[in-house]
Amino acid sequence: MYDALLAETITITGHGGDDIEAYAARPLTPGPLGGVVVIHHMPGYDAGTKEMVRRFAAEGYNAVCPNLYSREAPGAAPDDASATARALGGVPDDRLVGDVAGAARYLRGLPSANGRVGVIGYCSGGRQSFLSACRLELQAAVDCYGAFVTGTPPEGFPLQVEPIGHLAEDLSCPLLGLFGAEDKYPSPEATAELEAELRKHGKEYEFHTFEGAGHAFFSVDRPAYRQHAAVEGWQHILRFFGRHLATA
């Protein structure tokens, strides 16, 4: 099987018609292929996130990650860009949705696309993945330990975010949630609150909570990494996207 990939920095059209930086990867095969929008975590558009984009391409998907901090800190290192964005209260929800919509348009416009697009996010990106799936027409969404989908941010939290669990009624697609039993944001109680909202509105969802894992258990270069949770989590993600994105 021909397994070459193309990975590159590109420009896409985001919210309000803005040109924003993005990182894209795709298999060099004719398709048809599903698409994945990767939403980076609060630490930014970094090497680990780009590696995830390439992983999805290696698994047979067209993938793209918009740099959500393109406007605040163009060309800056991820840590610096993240600090700048945090100081301004983070990425506004409406702008986030517009940038994800632009990424989805890019994926659906590729010659190898099958028209089906999913979204996945980690940390702050998990909340943004859920938000995107409630505001846009998508075929699958994955929330990896997204804080404050439900629950209230603590005093002094740097991002200006509000809980959005009430938007579950508008969820456009199946949702996969991956959480750590030892996480505080989201806590198991917050996860249960979101599950109750989804059940109330008859939404299709699949939640997995991993014992012995806290926040950021996918991050291989951080002390929070938990191999058992990350390996099983990837298995759930690939099965989930395989069911919902692989068909034309």
Image (tube, rainbow, N blue to C red):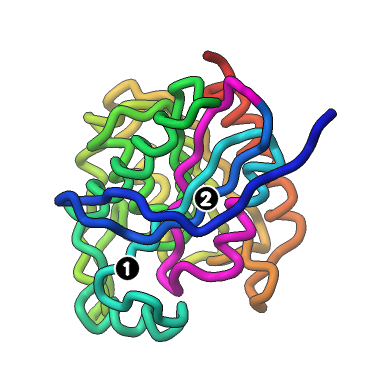
**Crowdedness near tag 1: few (<14), some (14–19) or many (≥20) residues, C-alpha within 10 Å:** some
Residue at 66%, 56% (x, y): give it.
211
Name the kind of residue labelled 2 in the image: Ala
Q: Quadrant of the N terminus?
A: top right
Q: CA distance from mark 2 to mark 1?
A: 15 Å
Residue at 34%, 32% (x, y): give it.
198
197, above or below 74, in the image: above
Residue 183 in view: yes
Identify the mark nearer the N-term, 2 or 1: 2
Residue 51 included in the magenta stretch of the image: yes
Instruction: Give coordinates of residue 239: x percent, y percent.
Output: 65, 30
Q: Quadrant of residue 79?
A: bottom left
Using the image as rendered, state which of residue 104 and residue 205 is in the foreground: 104
Mark 2 lies on residue: 24
33, above or below 146, in the image: above
Instruction: Give coordinates of residue 149: x percent, y percent.
Output: 31, 52
Q: At numbered mark 2, what does the secondary structure look like: helix, strand or loop? A: strand
Mark 1 lies on residue: 70
143, above or below 207, in the image: below
**Crowdedness near tag 2: few (<14), some (14–19) or many (≥20) residues, C-alpha within 10 Å:** many
Position of 73 with respect to 3 (left or right) is left
Residue at 47%, 31% (x, y): give it.
110
Instruction: Give coordinates of residue 30: x percent, y percent.
Output: 63, 24
- The boundaries of the magenta stretch are 30-53
Using the image as rendered, state which of residue 28 and residue 242 is in the foreground: 28
Residue 16 included in the magenta stretch of the image: no
